[in-house]
Amino acid sequence: MKQVVQNFRSGQLKVEELAPPALKPGGVLVRTACSLISAGTERTIVETAQSSLIGKARSRPDLVRQVLESVKREGIASTYEKVKARLDQSKALGYSASGVVVQVGRDAQEFRVGDRVACAGGGYASHAEVIFVPRNLCCAIPEAVSQESASYTTVGAIALQGVRQADPRLGETVAVIGLGLVGQLTVQLLKAAGCQVLGIDIDNDACELACLSGANAVATNPESARNTCESITAGRGADCVIITAATKSSEPVELAAEIARDRARIVVVGLVGMDVPRHSFFAKELELRLSRSYGPGRYDPNYEERGTDYPVGYVRWTEKRNMEAFLRFAAEGKINTDLLTTHRFSVASANEAYELILKGEERVCGVVLEYGRSDQGSDVVRTARAASPISDEVGVSFIGAGNFARGVLLPIVKRTSKVRMQGISTATGLSAKNTAEQFSFSYSTTDYQQILDDDNSQVVFVATRHDSHASLAAEALSRGKHVFVEKPLAINADGLREVISAASASDALLMVGYNRRFAPIATEIKKRFDNRTSPMTIVYRVNAGLLPRAHWSHDPEEGGGRIIGEACHFIDFVQFMTGEMPIRVSAQAVPRAADSGTVDDSSILTITLSGGSIATIIYTAGGDSSVPKERVEIFCDHSVATIDDFRKGSFVRDRKSVSLGKNLQDKGHAAEIEAFFGAIRTGGNSPIGIESLVATTLASFAAMDSIRTGESVIVDIQSIL
């Protein structure tokens, strides 16, 4: 399929041939009929990508801070790999489209194949021939509305949410500052609401178009705006001012304060400077409001990705209900998008459309991309390129390619000798193609079954979200593939049984990405304790950091929670260091603050091991990020070993201290992958035995049970084996 993408490093725009996205639960696949280029928003995105690295850094100082923190924690080399992986990706453009449903996922049965739908959302309603859209970002198109008009729905919902924030009353006067696409739609919506509208823009053409959209008066400069507003309001000033302009200047906010009446409402919709003139706002007791995109639900993964709606009695207008309202206005003839469409291009000519917008030589308002017939069959071909022929090298394929896979695993695998990068499967064709090009895979696809059916893929890395790890690993093992699963192995007992059963019946190796046991400092310390005569006492402190409340890892169905999803690392490390199996776990969690926007996952786990050793894992999310993430202390046989964030450590015995490590962080990722491929080539056992994998996973489950019950929980490995 064709899709419009832009390389973030070079800024190059092109129309790529990509595999269509995969169908996922809670959404639909849509064959696109039309998509709308939001000239203002997308121009900013495109120009940022085309700027220099310094320009990119200036536009996103928050990301620069993250990079600097990563350098402190992980060193320049590791940070460079992660930054390079992100910069080298192409990005999907577009967020407002319409089309016809061709496939319906589980939990999206409100839709049927053949439904005409309007679609929203960056990363979903892209400029692409086929798109996947979650159900709360998708709504039916009334019969009276064309596909082209419906492609305006997302931008219309943005305008409508701005109007809702302004809360205009019948007969009130509303000034709209900025008459681009959102501003024009705002004018039309205000007229539908029975308001008198003053349109303000420095562009004469935009003001003329606003008159056609229904504006009662227009102005092209601040003085004219002040005089016109005074005239049409009998000197009282505007009841509301909606700012839909896009400028770094704060002049729109200043002008809004000047033309507003006492106690008026000012709503900022566009990206403008926000140096608020306190005196003007204070003297008139003005109310400043901001409008968040299409409405309530925006930026909430539970709403947008997982389909959890807000009760209408509490949240009357969500982003989906705003989309539906906009379409209803269009069906009733209260919105005229034909008036706003200045250019139409086929998707194959998208470069010409963006060139037109960037040059600014013609008046541009609504620019529509057309995709031809949208009622073709529902067959979706997912292969981007054919597989490579069999060679003497080990063929490696990946299912999933998130940030960790691209930033850590893939660079290491690609550097591994006698390895052929075979296939990459991700949920979207763009992500798959990005990864295939960056890491020299033979082909990309959005259908993981192609990976499993490929005889040239002897090894499969599973790097998806946690809920699919067990089932994908089990399926790959049953096909005779060696499997490397990024942790955790499973998030529940049923999944663990499924994958262990498949591993037991297969001659292939199963490996889980518990890398810390392969770290040079860890292996050195273990050697020094080889001849120990007493149990170990281990304290492992983890300064994990907070995650937003809506982060997917907190979802018990998708992520399993951070104890199962991350603390398993530290449980495995304890097993490795002691050479013992966990037999009992007692855990307690810090109470969570109900009103916080983040979740404090702080917990303390005490693990009793089969040889008498005891380990305490202090997993704290509430610490300062400037403190190193991990510190380990091991006490045994009158000796003490320490590890500081796997950068350096020490071993103390008989009052003599030996320094360990080179002050360069090495958590063992490269060594674990080398060990995995070494076992495959020699026909040896997996670097981590199945019994150990089961014990680690069950111990993480036991920790969660102990937190819930307040009692210690037995780890019964035989219940799985």
Image (tube, helix red, strand yellow):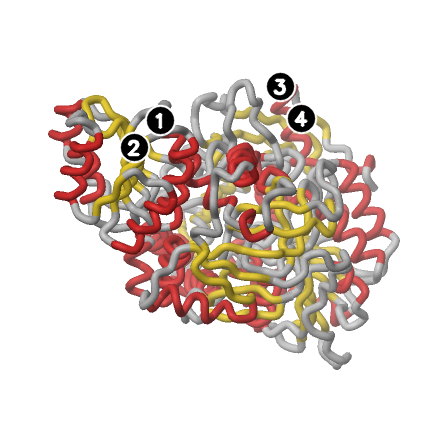
Q: Residue at x 71, y 67 (%)?
A: 383
Q: Residue at x 73, y 74 (%)?
A: 387
> Which class describes the residues within 10 Å of circle 1: few (<14), some (14-19), or many (20+)?
some
> x, y (%) of residue 656?
40, 50
Seen in the picture, residue 74 relative to 261 is either above or below; the reply is: below
Of callouts 4 and 3, the N-terminal one: 4
Is residue 455 or residue 42 the one in the foreground? 42
Quarter placement of the C terminus: top right
Q: On the image, which quarter does residue 38 sit in?
A: bottom left
Marks 2, 4: nearer the viewer: 2
What kind of residue is marked 1?
A: Pro
What distance separates the C-alpha of mark 2 from that of mark 3?
59 Å
What distance separates the C-alpha of mark 2 from that of mark 4?
58 Å
Is residue 649 or residue 708 the one in the foreground? 708
- CB within 8 Å, label 1 to label 2: yes
> Which class describes the residues within 10 Å of circle 2: few (<14), some (14-19), or many (20+)?
many
What distance separates the C-alpha of mark 1 from that of mark 3?
54 Å
What kind of residue is marked 2?
A: Val
What distance separates the C-alpha of mark 1 from that of mark 2?
7 Å
What distance separates the C-alpha of mark 4 from that of mark 3?
8 Å
Residue 323 located left or right of residue 366 = right
What kind of residue is marked 4?
A: Asp
Secondary structure under the numbered disc 3 in the rendered image? loop
Q: Is residue 640 visible?
A: no
> x, y (%) of residue 494?
79, 37
Which residue is label 3 attached to? 710
- CB within 8 Å, label 2 to label 3: no
